[in-house]
Every structure is written in structure tokens, then in C-alpha cells.
Amino acid sequence: MIETLDLILPLEASEDEAAWKAAAAKKLGVPESRVTGVRLLKHSLDARQRAVKVQLRLEVAVDEPLAEEVTPAWSAPSLPRDAKTAVIVGCGPAGMFAALRCLERGIKPIVLERGKDASARRFDLAPILRQGVVVEDSNYCFGEGGAGTFSDGKLYTRATKRGPVARVYEILVAHGAPQRILTDAHPHIGSNLLPNVVKAMRASILEAGGEVRFQAKVVDFILDGDHLRGVVTADGEEITGDAVILATGHSARDIYRLLAEKKILLERKPFAVGVRIEHPQPFIDAEQYHLRKDEARPDLLPAARYAVATKIDDRGVHSFCMCPGGFIVPASTENDEVVVNGMSLARRDSPFANSGLVVTVEPEDTDSFAKEHGVLSGIAYQKALEVAAKQAGGGGQ
Ligand SMILES: Cc1cc2nc3c(=O)[nH]c(=O)nc-3n(C[C@H](O)[C@H](O)[C@H](O)COP(=O)(O)OP(=O)(O)OC[C@H]3O[C@@H](n4cnc5c(N)ncnc54)[C@H](O)[C@@H]3O)c2cc1C
């Protein structure tokens, strides 16, 4: 018999397979000796009370062996000789997953990326970290893996919109992300592991017959009436395909300007802006885990996180991208602005926590920029805030 069971265990027993077996046997009403295997399917913490409980979903085998665990893999069929081509602009998460999907469907992706590969890109972070100088096409946002490469790698969201999330996790694991993201309720990869995941995804794209070109910045579109046939790169090369996918992310403002210039339909949407706040991690741990004064966080508990949301004057305000045990990083892509983001290593062991605290901005809030910037008023408003932040901060990053 194979059963799926939900169990609640005290923290101290939650990592102990013998305790899982004992609890499973008790719940099923069978002697422990008949439980022949247990496998973790889901793991989440309930820290609402001082005595932290761990909720586990287990696959439990009784009187028969558990089927062997299948390690996630990614593969694609061989490309036909006359395969259609998709030009994918941007090698961030969206571009890379689009390329893998194309290959699964027998379409050859040609990925064009303005920045450098993940290894070379690392050297371009030094000027922004040490001298406050942004290398404009190679930074925390631009380059192989996009903003994802040095991101925190939190794979959870409060958004309710859902695609095939489980398959995305499996593809990440197939490319070197830790297996535990398949079971954690709040999966997290960590900035130190992501560059290798990104490089492995590129290797899969190349092995399956796709192309990835770095320092290939798209500066123009080749339009045939309403049809986007291809793109032109900064060095003048024209690259056409059966389809063009723009996966340039939200930092590539030049692409939005190009779209507007070419009269391609754009629409203003709500977004959020705010600040990033840093706290001592022990302060967050003490609050969230109900620790006594000077009591350290137990080793079995991860650095605590939080999420807050409220409405002020009918406007949503919420925490965003909270990074327990993390760092604040300079994520500007141009030298006249200040933009920050948060990341953490897989161990989440920095003494600080940080989180964005953001407020919703509706399209009409940016109307004062619309006269000059039209449909790009939101982007102009964002840019004005980022430039003001740079000036207010004394001009550094
Ligand atoms: C420090 C940091 C931490 C983050 N932490 C998290 C997190 O924990 N969880 C989470 O979900 N999200 C996080 N994010 C956000 C996440 O990284 C982005 O939402 C995600 O990368 C967006 O993916 P994308 O592919 O749409 O765009 P991007 O990642 O922005 O990729 C776009 C790519 O297109 C390229 N490009 C742009 N213009 C051109 C052009 N003209 N020609 C050629 N190439 C071009 C860019 O160089 C870039 O590589 C974080 C971001 C940062 C910077």
C-alpha cells in the first residue's frame, strides 16, 4: 500500500526519518515494522506559536517498496533540418525558458543577449560595487541569465496567477538547482548557486541545437507591415526568424522606447515602487519565532521571513521580495540612477534581513509625465524617482 499522509511534527523531530516513520505508522494504525519507506513531498513551517511545528506531506509505503525516485531531467527531440526559427531577444529567465520550450516543440531558438556570459559578467560587478560605476550593458540586470543570475532565487510569490510551476522547478533541478526546491513550501535557490544553473541551461540550449549569442544588443526591429520578422543588432547584423520573442525584461527601457517609436501597441499598467529596508536578522527571528531576550534562533530554523500588506487611503502597500539573511545590491543599469534589490546565499546566513516596501502606482498617477512621454509615462516617472534617489544619496551607488 502506498499512501500520501499529512503529518505535523515538533521541530526537533522534523528532520528525523525514524520519527517520520513512527508518526506515519501511528496515523495509519499499523506497526512501525510494516512501514517500508517514506519520502518527503512537502515541507512547511508553522511558526505562529512559540513551539514551532513542521507540516510534512509524506509518501508512505506499507508492506511494499517505494518506487525509486525519478530525478528531474530536461531533454528535447532532435531538431528537424527544416526547423522553424524563433529569434529570442534577452537571455533572462523568460528568454531561457522560451528557448527550452521552443526546442521541446522542434523550433530552433536564436537567443540574443546584450550582456556577457555569466562568468565574464561577474567581473563587471566590481566597478559598481567598488567605485559606484555601472557598466551599462553588463551588470546585476543585464547579461546571461538576466536579472535572475545574481537574484535571490526565491521561487514563491503571493500572486495567485499560476502556470506549470512544478515543471519549472523540475527544469531548474535538472540544471543543478537543489532538489529541496521540489518539496519546500517556500523554495529558494540562492545567489551563489544560480550562475551555474544558468550556465547549465545554456549548455542544454546549445546541445539541443539552439544558438546563444552574447554582446548582441538589439537596437532595431525588422517589420513587414504588422509582422515582426527580425531584429537588427548594434553591430548592424540583421537576424530574421519565423517568430520573434521579446524577453528583454523591465530594465530595458530602450526597448520600450523602440516599441513606442515603431508604433507597436503599448498599454500603461499599474506597477509598484518603493524602498528597500534592512534590519538585523536576529530582530526578525526574535519577532517571528517568539524568541526570549538574547535567545538565539535554533539551528533547525531558517532565517525568518515576513510579509506585510495593508491599504492606506485605498492604496495597496506591501512588503516585496523579502530576503532573510541577505544583502542589498546595487541593481542600476544606468549611471544617473540608483536602483536596489535584495539577494541572499543559499545558506541565508548574513546577519541582515532586507525587504522592499512598495506602494501601487496606477497609470493615472503618472499623468503629469504623459504630455512629454505618452504611453511611457510610468517609465519616465520611475526614472525620475531613480535619478532623484541618486541625487539624494549623494551621487554614489
Ligand atoms: C538582485 C535581484 C534579486 C532578485 N530576486 C528575485 C527573487 O528572489 N525571486 C524572483 O522571482 N525574482 C527576483 N528578482 C527579479 C527577477 O530576477 C526578474 O523578475 C527576472 O529576472 C525577470 O526575467 P526576464 O527574463 O523577464 O527579464 P530579465 O531577467 O531582465 O532579462 C532580460 C534580458 O534581456 C536582455 N536584454 C535587454 N535588452 C536587450 C536588447 N536590446 N538586446 C539584447 N538583449 C537585451 C538583458 O540583458 C537581460 O539579460 C531579483 C532581481 C534582482 C536584480
Image (spheres, grey):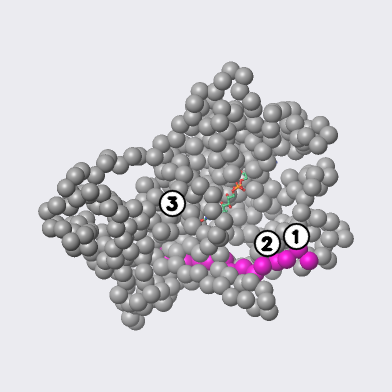
Q: Residue at x 65, y 69 (%)?
A: 359
Between the residue at mark 2 and the residue at mark 3, the CA separation in whole angstroms equals 26 Å
390 or 66, nearer to the observer = 66
Between the residue at mark 2 and the residue at mark 1, the CA separation in whole angstroms equals 8 Å
Pointer 2 and pointer 1: residues touching (CB < 8 Å)?
yes
Q: Main secondary structure of the magenta part?
A: strand
Residue 263 place in picture, x, y as percent:
83, 45
Residue 111 belongs to magenta span: no
Q: Earlier in the sequence, mark 3 or mark 1?
A: 3
- Mark 3 burial class by Cα count in 10 Å: few <14, some 14-19, many 20+: many
Image: magenta residue range: 350-364
Between the residue at mark 3 and the residue at mark 1, the CA separation in whole angstroms equals 32 Å
Residue linked to disc 2? 271
135 or 256, nearer to the observer = 256
SS type, badge 3: loop
Tell me the kind of residue under disc 1: Gly
Residue linked to disc 3? 189
Residue linked to disc 1? 378
Tell me the kind of residue under disc 3: Ile
Residue 131 place in picture, x, y as percent:
60, 54
Residue 355 belongs to magenta span: yes
Tell me the kind of residue under disc 2: Phe
Q: Tell me if residue 194 can be seen.
A: no
- Mark 2 burial class by Cα count in 10 Å: few <14, some 14-19, many 20+: few
Residue at the limit of the structure toward the right, as seen here: 371
Please state if 270 lies on the left or on the right of 63 as rendered. Answer: right
Q: Quadrant of residue 301?
A: bottom left
Q: Tell me if residue 158 can be seen.
A: yes
Mark 1: C-beta under 8 Å from nearest atom of ligand 1: no
Please state if 167 lies on the left or on the right of 59 as rendered. Answer: right
